[in-house]
Amino acid sequence: MSQAQKKDAPEWIEDSVVFRGMIRRSGNSLAITIPAELLQRFLLKEGQEFVMLGMSRFRPDFEGALQIYLGYFIVYEKTFGISLTLSIGEKLNEVLKTLEHLATRYGATKYTKRILEDGKLEFKAIFGMIADGSFKRVRSKEEVESIMTDILAELLSMGVKIESSSLFEEILEWRNIDPSMISKLPHKATEMIRWKWEI
């Protein structure tokens, strides 16, 4: 990393809780103990790799530190979504407005729209758990199927022709989640996600 990149990179944020420890001998090496609170806060596990960096600074006295770099925390979320292909004719703006309203009403965490040839519209909505770094209630496959039924009924009442509709499953990757948020989730929620540290 160049000096310019280092200058533009965000600063590390220190956690408020500080632990004091003691370096001890383990065979031919020296070892330190990681407190249980930090294991839980960063979702650490036995056998996990890390990079250790020696650090120093003068301010004005000489200070030394060891940084244990864990890497990037990556979360994979299993989600259910709906995919619709609609014949909209002259009702493009009205249908788009309705779809956006319905996606918001039913709590979609992400949706996309794409205009196809011959006056058709492709609309996809995902009903996941992670949205903007926060967590929503877990949606089951059956619940998303019920949402799709309600949305189709609303569109049919507007006179929109449904070319196709389907339920799909998608794995989303997130890199902006603090592991401490996951450690506080109920067990049912953690069944929909998996995570790893990547150096």
Image (cartoon, rainbow, N blue to C red):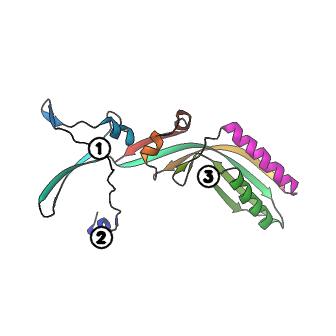
Q: Does the magenta portion include 147?
A: yes
The quarter of the displayed image where residue 155 is located: bottom right
Q: Pointer 2: what residue?
A: 4
Crowd around label 3: few <14 · some 14–19 · many ≥20 (10 Å): some
Where is residue 110? Give x, y as percent: 62, 54
Q: Residue at x 64, y 41 (%)?
A: 139
Where is residue 73? Give x, y as percent: 41, 47
Crowd around label 2: few <14 · some 14–19 · many ≥20 (10 Å): few
In front of the other: 16 or 123 = 16
Tell me which amino acid carries mark 3: Thr
Q: Residue at x 87, y 54 (%)?
A: 157
Secondary structure of the residue carrying tag 2 is: helix
Magenta stretch, residue numbers: 138-160
Q: Which of marks 3 and 2 is nearer the N terminus?
A: 2
Q: How many marks?
A: 3
Quadrant where the N terminus is found in the figure: bottom left
Q: Pointer 1: what residue?
A: 50
* Residues at marks 3 and 2, CA–CA distance in whole angstroms: 36 Å
The quarter of the displayed image where residue 180 is located: top left
Where is residue 168? Give x, y as percent: 66, 44
Q: Pointer 3: what residue?
A: 109
Are dots 3 and 1 in contact, CB under 8 Å?
no
Tell me which amino acid carries mark 2: Ala
- Any part of residue 42 in sight: no
Tell me which amino acid carries mark 1: Phe
Q: Which of marks 3 and 1 is nearer the N terminus?
A: 1
Where is residue 106? Give x, y as percent: 70, 50
Q: Nearer the viewer, mark 3 or mark 1?
A: 3
Report the predominant secondary structure element of the magenta stretch: helix
* Residues at marks 2 and 1, CA–CA distance in whole angstroms: 26 Å
* Residues at marks 3 and 1, CA–CA distance in whole angstroms: 33 Å
Q: Which residue is drawn at 73% across and 41% down?
A: 145
